[in-house]
Image: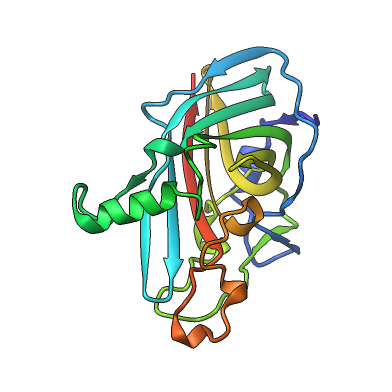
Amino acid sequence: MKTLKLSGFLLASALLTFSCGQNNKTVETSEAQEEAQSSGETLQLDTNSSTVNWRGYKPTGQHHGIIPITSGEISIDGDAITSGEFTFDITKLEIHDLEEGSENHGKLSNHLQSDDFFDAANHPQATFVITEVSPYTSGDAVEDQEQFESENTPKGESELAPASPTHWISGNLTMRGTTKNIKFPAAVSLSDGSVSAQAGFNIDRTEWGLAYGDEATAVDKTKDKFIYNAVSVNFDIKAN
């Protein structure tokens, strides 16, 4: 893996804007890549103060919540990140826009756990393993993906991304037994033996087989008979 020196980039990140340079998509999805080899000191993820939020969209509404992180670690060598791995509990996915215990909450929760979406009975966990970290430079930018316009159009990539990204992070995301490599910008800082990172981006859920209501199959989108393929993910993680 290419290690990335954190010093210097934090100051430079304040000068970055989204209006210059080449238009890099927030998430580049590709086939699984070789995992990074850890070296140096290993820091354990603080699961109590680390969060992963999700938001799904359909023309008639939105749903959002969190996916609990059960474990994780990041390896650093001096001021360089060398590897990282995180595990998520799909069976404990939370829905925050519906009252827990209500009929609608139960229906949505069961549907998300079913074979239409995560197939949690067969794939109860998701994982993310870092494959590469590279600098986010002043020539990089975030490009919003074109979406079908409705009252609930998914948030754009430039809205989701951190205000001053410092790195591009690439990693293998495994869900529902499928592994794809994704690349997104993040704001990362390292100080006093701890690492924190924030990021926000959209993924195409159908890449991992979560294809129920796939908007690509909608004959007439004005009938609202589809769910947007884009799912917004925001995370704030800390390791000590």
Work out whether residue 131 can be spotted.
yes
Tell me the colour scheme of the image.
rainbow
164 shown above or below 33: below
Task: From the top left corner, tell me how far across and down residue 148 is, in percent.
Answer: 55, 79
Residue at (72, 29) in percent of width and height: 5
Residue at (49, 73) in percent of width and height: 226
Residue at (63, 48) in percent of width and height: 185
The quarter of the picture where residue 129 lies is top right
Q: Quadrant of the N terminus?
A: top right
Image label count: 0
Task: From the top left corner, tell me how far across and down residue 166 is, in percent.
Answer: 63, 43
- Say whether residue 238 is left or right of residue 98: right
> In terms of depth relative to the viewer, which is nearer, 65 or 37?
65
Task: From the top left corner, tell me how far across and down residue 157 is, in percent.
Answer: 57, 62
44 shown above or below 4: above
179 shown above or below 2: below
- Say whether residue 221 is left or right of residue 144: left
> In terms of depth relative to the viewer, which is nearer, 59 or 160?
59
Task: From the top left corner, tell me how far across and down residue 162 is, in percent.
Answer: 53, 51
Work out whether residue 204 can be spotted.
no
